[in-house]
Image (cartoon, grey):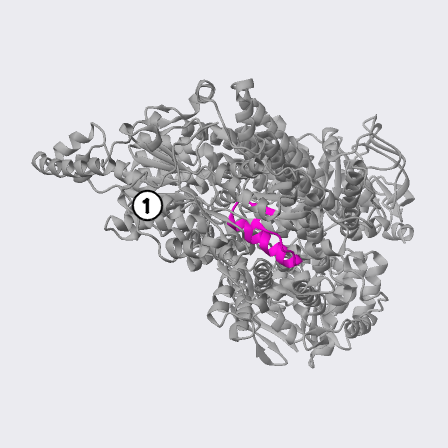
Amino acid sequence: MIRDIIVKWAPLLVLVFLVLLFPIFEWLEDFRAGKDHIYLLDSRFFSVRNASRIAVAATPGLMVAIGVTFIIIMGSIDLSMEGSVSISAVIFAFAFLALGGTLLSWAWLAIPAAMLVGAGIGFVNGLVHVVFRIPSFMVSLAMGFVGTGLALVLTGGDRIRIEDEVFRSLLTVRWLNFPIMCYVALLALLVAWFIQSHTTLGRNFYAIGGGEELAQASGLNVARIRVLGFALAGVFFALGALMAVGRIGIAETATGNNFMFISIAAVVVGGTALWGGIGGIPNTLVGILIVYVITNGMVVIGLPSWLQDGVLGVLVITAVVLSTSRKSISFVK
Amino acid sequence: MYQLKAVDKHFPGVHALQAVDFEVQRGEIVGLVGENGAGKSTLMKVIYGAYQPDGGEIKIDGKRVRFQNPRQAMDHGIGMVFQEQSLIPNLTVMENIFLGFEKQFVTFGVVSWRAMATAARAQLAKVKLDIDPTTITSDLSFAQRQLVELVKVLTLEERIDGDLVILLDEPTSVLAEEEVKLLFQIVRGLTKRASFIFVSHRISEVLELSDRIYIMKDGAVVDVVHSNDADLDDIQHKMVGREINSEYYREHKQQAYNSNDVLVSFDNVGLQGSYRNISFDLHAGEVLCLVGTEGSGREAILRTVFGRDPCNAGRVKIKGEPVTAFSPMAGVRRGIGHVPRERKIEGIVNGMNVYENMTLAQIRKFARLGIMNVPAEKQLANEWIERLGIKTPSVAKDCGGLSGGNQQKVVLAKWRSSGSDILLLDHPTRGLDIGAKEDVYEMIREMSANGVGILLAADTLEEAIGLSHTIIVLKDGEIQKRFEYATGSKPSLYDLVHHMI
Amino acid sequence: MSFIKRFIEAETASRRNFLLAGAYGITGAAALRMFGPSPIMAMTYDEPTIAWSYRNRTNPYWNEIVSGGEAFVESLGKSKDDLTHLINEGSSEKSLADVKALLAKTDGKLALAIDTNDAPNARPVVEACVEAGAFVSTLWNKTDDLHPWDFGDNYVSHMSWSDEGPAEQTARILLDAMGGKGGVVHLGGIASNNPAIERLNGLKNALKDYPDVELLDAQPADWDTQKANQVMQGFITRYGDEITGVHCANDTIGYGVLEALRAEGMDVPIVTYDGNPQAVDLVAEGKILATVFTNPHWGGGITASLAYHAAVGHFKPSEEPAEHREFYGPTIFITPADAQEFKTNYLDNVPTYDWTDFWGPSNGQIMYK
Amino acid sequence: MTHEILRPHFPWITLVALIVIVGIANPAFFSVSGFVILMADVIPLLIMAIGMTFAIYIGGIDLSIQQLANMVTVMTTVYLAQFGISVALLVVLVGGLFGIISGFVTTRLYVPSFVSTLAIGFIALSIAKWLSNQRALFMDATLRDAHFGWMFGNTMGVPHELVIGLLLAFFAWLLQTRTPFGRALKAVGSGELAAVASGIDVDRVKIFAFGLSGMFAAFAGLMFSVKLSGGDAQLANGFLLLAIVAVLVGGTPLTGGVGGIINTVIGTLIVMVIRAAMVYLEIDATQQQMIFGIVLIVAIALTIDRSKLRSVVK
């Protein structure tokens, strides 16, 4: 029983451990240099400013990871995030500029437009997956290529700058030390959590992840739920795209790069099982924070750059090992 | 009230249902029996809407209906209680109960968990199950799950105005005796509201519960009998088209075992949470049966012998050697064969053909210089196919496509051909039809005569009594009673049940 | 002999040969081909396919390169669609495989301009081209032991940029702006890429003259805006106000850094590299102190041009001096003072280059250390 | 019924159809020598995909192969002078070791291979960066030719790398179809629980499968390093997704137990043809990636053997 509780809270414990770990290195460094340093209090890592930096860095990844969480809970996987993010970002930017270029005009329509694009890609993903009975891994991988390719065709490789001060206030305006985009992300997180735990659709994801045939036999329209799930994931990928554009003010074909492995690693590190049915949105929040705390912390303590990948690898394995309930699984592939 | 008229169903190469007439009256409990492959499951699938018949018609209260999917059947009051494991383990009990019908608790897209819990409690009360509806389903016992399964179907009561028809598919297979009694009591109590179709291999239970019994054979209904004027032998006779007599368990072939040759020896063995203080010896040629309810520890003991669950108290010796390292690999090396209950998952490898399955436990023996000797494998497979009468078009046929009985024979051939002299049989006849069961019994006798020690967890008590030299009754992980039997002095069912509960 | 003069001679020679070839007929031309590429071959056979192989289209730098290649093709009176693009997506394997496929398709009648994605990949690409009788010019990536003159005519040229000097100069601009004191951080490209190494070295060289400035940290940001943004956030946490200047290995890194600074409300001078149009705008606005324009448009055009003109026999690479086979590309500094002017001259109106003036704007022979 | 008989043959039918289509669109594609060259070039990818097949065949995945190959290019370049030809042995052993570690983490620590191999890959990348000092390194040409010249010669018009690739493919095929290990692999891939119940050491089989994947990745890295005459920490980038695609498009689904080495050979050739088609059919550069994705979906839809998939497709 105690073991179960530890497993359940392991991701959070890992996060807390990491947050307390990096300041130790800072303390050591200053101690060696003979500077005064009170652990945590004088930490640059353990500070509100840095928390907001980590939050800003993590928001796009969080949105993407939330999207893929829904899919993983269903026991499927969606690898189209890089393409979906790129195409959503690019179409958002084009629409935004075409409709006036500032949020205070009709250009705000670009935001729902981008979300529609994301939903559309996800919808096609789900449809091809369900109708042609092709495993989601393959469909979404290929759809990712299509998404990135489409973004490339549209931009011809150019980057689109979004200069609008109102839109960029996502990053530049702070409430209580945190930029607005963090609050937007928080809102999206709450919506996702709400969908997961308080709507039929969200619960049906768990049902499918727990036993698809059984869910089907209970009269659930599994195909429809799957397609909806992929579309929902697409919406969150598009939100991730909006955050990414909001963060650096540029939409380009490369906007989606590097999201795939980071987001899936974050979901798993957070304690959501790849075989479906277990975990959820709060786990993903913890997971993504773990990943970004590690990347931020490594730079802050001045770890040599060549070492950073390896340390990330070791910490990811450790986090997953700690948060896996050995009882509930007979074998792992 | 519910009526099938001349229903036909064809599959490629098979005429699965032939002009089946079937009828359920209001408040009636109808039994449905038949050997495997007789068409029971096809008929059930037609009834609950998973299959659409090719011919004939379905009528409810005289009105013709046609279901595209189970959901539509449910909307007409037809519900299915599945064998087992049809609840989704990671969901709460209440979510499982209302799965697919959450709408009633949704306002503006929000599910009200409180309303659902209240409703679920009311439903659970119907079967007198007192559990928290927010419990995660995987935390329930088998029996509780079976009842939740029933509750799930009973929710139709509120949703549907008309009458209910509830199919019970082998509902007792995972239940202990007293749980079966409770279930029957509940079912009888519900006949005020619903009719039942009860499908089981346990004909005695069907006789006990049902008002009328449909007997199926080869896709057709061969007879309909009233349970008052039917008896077990009669029904079995109609199912298989031949007599079932005392020869059934091949008792005349039972030979005394060699009590000097101890194969497995347990000395005060225990495993935390499963069983404790277990001592017994399994001899060459002995059939030793462990009897007990689900959770009495018999499966865990089998697993310990095979090496899957290491014990943490006492001493286990196999062929005189103390066992220190437990693993299935070591078990197989010691000559232990395991015929698991989950035949399709643990018994055969679905996707590998007959000869690959047969040599699976002895791959290395068929390798020459690291290369598999396939002709030798095929030869071995052909020998055993002939010896055990395995029906397969070829040795290269995918085992997943064989019938249950033939799969089981392949599993037995796997162990016997590799020379295992200790066999663990975990419900070896589960889900097999009578003909296949007899074949299995025959093989058990033959192996026993050849000096193989057999540790058995039987499907039914009759089977246990019929087959064993020795019976050990277990309850809550402890040995209650030990019976030694020679042919002709077999105990009665009552003797055993008395110690089990 | 000046190039132009030789060019005119070659032109007349090829016309004469063309008439001859007409007399010989096709067989004669085919026979002549055995003696290696010659003007006759160029005129009697199809024009060689002109191809540019590069990393991707998501980086403005490569788009500039490509626009140069297209401008060159158009200068030949062809459509810009006649330029074949090979995109390697950062994969050396794809880079090589695509080149081989194109060689097979064109049967070696190919003028290839290429950045091989990674230095070691240059050798097999060049060897494949040489073997197939195609003409290849490389840009940026090649290992130091690989030289055009070791391959006769077919490995036409290699162009690179000496980044150490210009990077040092931008560093000086930065360090001066910092008042010659404080702390500077460097965000680099993919660590093993040559330009990334040279640009960091440039900064280090400059720092020797500024003893009061400390190089706080240098980490790779892989030429990537988002990664740069994250790395800069880490730097800000670690060093906070100690950072009084940022030295970026290219413009795209600079964008990420600017946004990280903007999020913190910090105003720290930064310098970048490459001179992308957006960066030039930022220089004009004063947000970036300086960037270095390497004229990728010209680089892209002239690399293709060299391969093409060698392939059609307008000049014989093996007769050219070493400084015409391996040379540095041009660099132009852009500072707020001249950004506007630069923009008008180079970006808003892309100059029409004489694509036969191969070495005019070049910057001397490549020197190895 | 004919559909069922044809099913297992769909991968190569797809391949032939693709070749014919591209060939009709551009007859220059039908050139034996051109084809041989194309195939020789796809050999490192083939070797990686073969390794990946072992991981996928047991229902896992190996995301570390690209980073392992990166590390191996660096190791080969750095240690060539010191060890000579035995550097090949060294790197293959190191690759196998990394694979075994992945397998160990997956089976004994219960970390899904998707994550464990990703993380092990990161560790390999760190080592590659450290060993290369974050520089692009190149080999001494004479040393390379002395020790590994045999890899890239030509005998009677047949490139040696093609021979090596086919030999390795044959070896892998033998391993998969004709050895006790291959049989155990199949049992683990199609029915893990039954394999356990038959006394097969499932963990060891899996660890060995990942080890093989690592060894093949290392060999591919070695060949690539010799071919490119150098090494650095991102030389092999771009291999990973392509290797996965090659395995999947050949008809080995991620669920394991179905498909195999032959399928991967066909899958690799399909990828090769699609890619070469982009060049031969002069597809606009900006559109290539999009078209690649679409063709991929169609190809997978054609090649995948749904009858062997579990009833549930996830």
Is residue D76 found left or right of C213 in the rendered image?
Answer: left
x, y percent for residue B54: 51, 67
Q: Position of residue A301 (x, y in %)?
A: 72, 42
Q: Quadrant of residue B80?
A: bottom right
- Can I make out residue C324 in this image? yes
Q: Name the residue at the left extreme.
A: C23
How many marks can you see? 1
Q: Amino acid at mark 1?
A: Tyr
Residue C28 position by quadrant = top left
Range of residues picked out in magenta:
C246-270
The residue identified by callout 1 is D280
Name the quarter where the N terminus of chain C is drawn. top left
Is C261 inside the magenta-drawn segment?
Answer: yes
From the viewer's perspective, tell me whether residue C227 is left or right of residue B334: left
Image spot of residue A222 (x, y percent): 60, 64
Residue B329, relative to residue A94: is it above or below?
Answer: above
Residue D81 is a magenta residue: no
